[in-house]
Amino acid sequence: RKVKGGNIDVHPSEKALIVHYEVEATILGELGDPMLGERKECQKIIRLKSLNANTDIGSLARKVVEECKLIHPSKLGEVEQLLYYLQNRRDASAGKEKKEKTSKPPKNPPPFEGTEIDEVANINDMDEYIELLYEDIPDKVRGSALILQLARNPDNLEELLINETALGALARVLREDWKQSIELATNIIYIFFCFSSFSQFHGIITHYKIGALCMNIIDHELKRHELWQEELAKKKKADILLIYPENQTLKKDYEKTYKKYKGLVVKQEQLLRVAIYLLLNLAEDTRIELKMRNKNIVHMLVKALDRDNFELLILVVTFLKKLSIFMENKNDMVEMDIVEKLVKMVPCEHEDLLNITLRLLLNLSFDTGLRSKMVHVGLLPKLTALLGNENNKKVAICILYHISMDDCFKSMFAYTDCIPQLMKMLFECPDERVDLELISFCINLAANKRNVQLICEGNGLKMLMKRALKFKDPLLMKMIRNISQHDGPTKSQFIEYVGDLAAQVSNDEEEEFVIECLGTLANLTLPELDWELVLKEYKLVPYLKDKLKPGSAEDDLILEVVIMIGTVSMDDSCAALLAKSGIIPALIELLNAQQEDDEFVCQIIYVFYQMVFHQATRDVIIKETQAPAYLIDLMHDKNAEIRKVCDNTLDIIAEYDEEWAKKIQTEKFRWHNSQWLEMVESRQMDDSEQYLYGDDPIEPYIHEGDILERPDLYYNADGLIAPDGAVSPDIFGDYQLQNGDLVGQHPFSG
């Protein structure tokens, strides 16, 4: 660090000189090269209260230059001139009110002043205050209290920073004597707290290792508080058990101990508050925060949650909230059962404490296990009760939203008054789009059937549909889509809105909104619904066919179109209408384009599955398209759902078409054989070393007749090849189809 002197001015209102100087700090690399630098302009005030008409200006100027290292000796003449000016200048404040200085206070200073003393501190008497730090404990308390008065004024911090003697003495006294006096420890930590309120002063606190010392002090005080409580509990227990008149002395002893305990707790909590606040300020640097974590800061803070002091609790919860964004800290909180401690603060009469506690719970609610614990300790109804609190409603909704992400907890909301409150908020929302947190929470709740029954009570569904269609809100329509997926009376209510939903399916509407409308329609698998009439009246077939072209729209929209086609294909007349429109070839083309996307493949195959139930569309699929061939290729797909739908569809095709039945049987037979051969080969490779010298147990069976030497068991793409090379479909005579598998006297069985 380099300090460079600058100009010297006179103070505008006081008898003082202002010395301007520049501080340049540079971080050097391993080879001494400058890596990072920062330059800051500062000023030092030299007050000259002894200056009067009889002062020897020359002597005073020499003294100023000698004592202030920021003034170069070459500027002695300039200092003399300025002193002459001050000596002859009229007091600018005479006859006027002195204008009070305005300065930026330390951020959120603790609301106590330190040790109360009558004397007013003066920056020029700093040497006297430092001398007090070398006396006995009472003098040290007084000296530290006077320095604290100065430190509480931010204008004095830079001057104190330069006084390394004072800071060194304060750090030494704190390190050696903090156990001797809680007031002394509080005063000195408070002084360093004033520095910690400004990031540029954090280096000096780190230099004197005040942070580590504060952690030791906090740990010691928390343990001491536990001992006080144990001692108090013992005396209270004795007081309860011994209730005879002659034991009044014991009762008085308890009352005296309790009064002393309360006094100690008040002082201790002041010390804890200022120490924790200092650490919170230092934790702006994540490297320092990591050091605190390694020294168990989380455990200390969670222990402090047992206190009753609101100001201390606000500070502790704020610190925990900051720490909770890191997984390691969150895991430490889990070990300390933090949720059980926080739930006691919800609700809370102190608004600030309630708000910061909810924000900490929100951070913790990203963890699945902690969400479960929140529900089990009874937080759900407490959070629901806060939905009417304007200051905390939004945070409560966010926590409830996280809880609603778990399917096992969705149904629990039906046993609170949460849903009626949410519906009221939805319908009374003045904006076109509902708040994101609110609608996201409602979307999750709508995934549960019991919740949906409460949502749709009265005119619930009607009001939702009216608002969604009026403002074209895709998220509100997503909620309605979730409602439509549940079978029962709720789904039947949608019949009167089919026309409104179908009217939204066009190129004129926002794509996200159309996706949700299509998804809602696709969920309406109602036998009483005339889908043919809907398709014709709203001219949906051309739209659906057009959107099947790869690249015609976003994949999400195309997928919803496929699902919609699958739903309407359950109706015989609709399936025929779609087949005549040429949708099946379009689906096959889409299948080729999206063959890597399992969701697309599964939904397209499901459309084929629905269509093969109807005579008209079955004939088109079997005789006019290559859909069965694609299904055969997908019979053995790695996705279990795709295999299942393929097998079911091919079973129906095989039942109605003999030619395809033979091809399907051939493919299944070929697949089983190839799987068996792979198994044998892999076994031979695994056992090759073990049977290297002729001990292979398979060898005797191969000698009797090696199956690989039998050409009659060879196969090609069309079926099995007989020894003479001719195709012999009669080979299937001994086989039959059961549950999609070929069974019979298999040459490879066993």
Image (tube, rainbow, N blue to C red):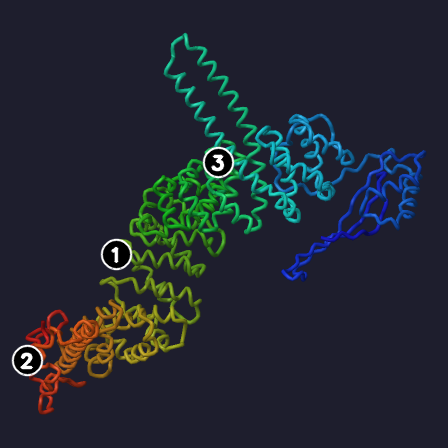
The disc at residue 487 is 1
Label of residue 304 in the image? 3
Measured as percent of width and height from the top left, residue 468 is found at: 41, 58
Residue 701's spot in the image, x, y percent?
8, 77
Give the SS element for disc 2.
helix
Secondary element at image label 3: helix
- Residue 204 position within the rendered picture, expressed as x and y whole percent measured from the top left: 65, 45
Please tell me which of labels 2 and 1 falls first in the chain.
1
Q: Residue at position x 57%, y 33% from top? A: 271
Eyeballing the image, is 616 above or below 404? below
Residue position marked by numbered label 2 in the rendering: 704
Crowding around mark 2 (Cα neighbors within 10 Å: few <14, some 14 to 19, many 20+) is: few
Task: State the image quarter where residue 554 is shown.
Answer: bottom left
Q: Are marks 2 and 3 in contact (CB under 8 Å)?
A: no
**Amino acid under disc 2:** Glu
Give the number of the disc on residue 691. none
**Sequence-wise first label, 1 or 3:** 3
- The residue nearer to you, when weighing 75 against 586, is 75
Q: Amino acid at mark 3?
A: Ala
User: Does residue 243 appear to the left or right of 660 in the view shown?
Assistant: right
How many numbered circles does the render carry?
Answer: 3
C-alpha distance separating marks 1 and 3? 51 Å
Q: Nearer the viewer, mark 2 or mark 3?
A: 2
Residue extending furthest front?
Answer: 693
Near mark 3 (Cα within 10 A), the count class, few <14, some 14-19 or many ≥20, is some
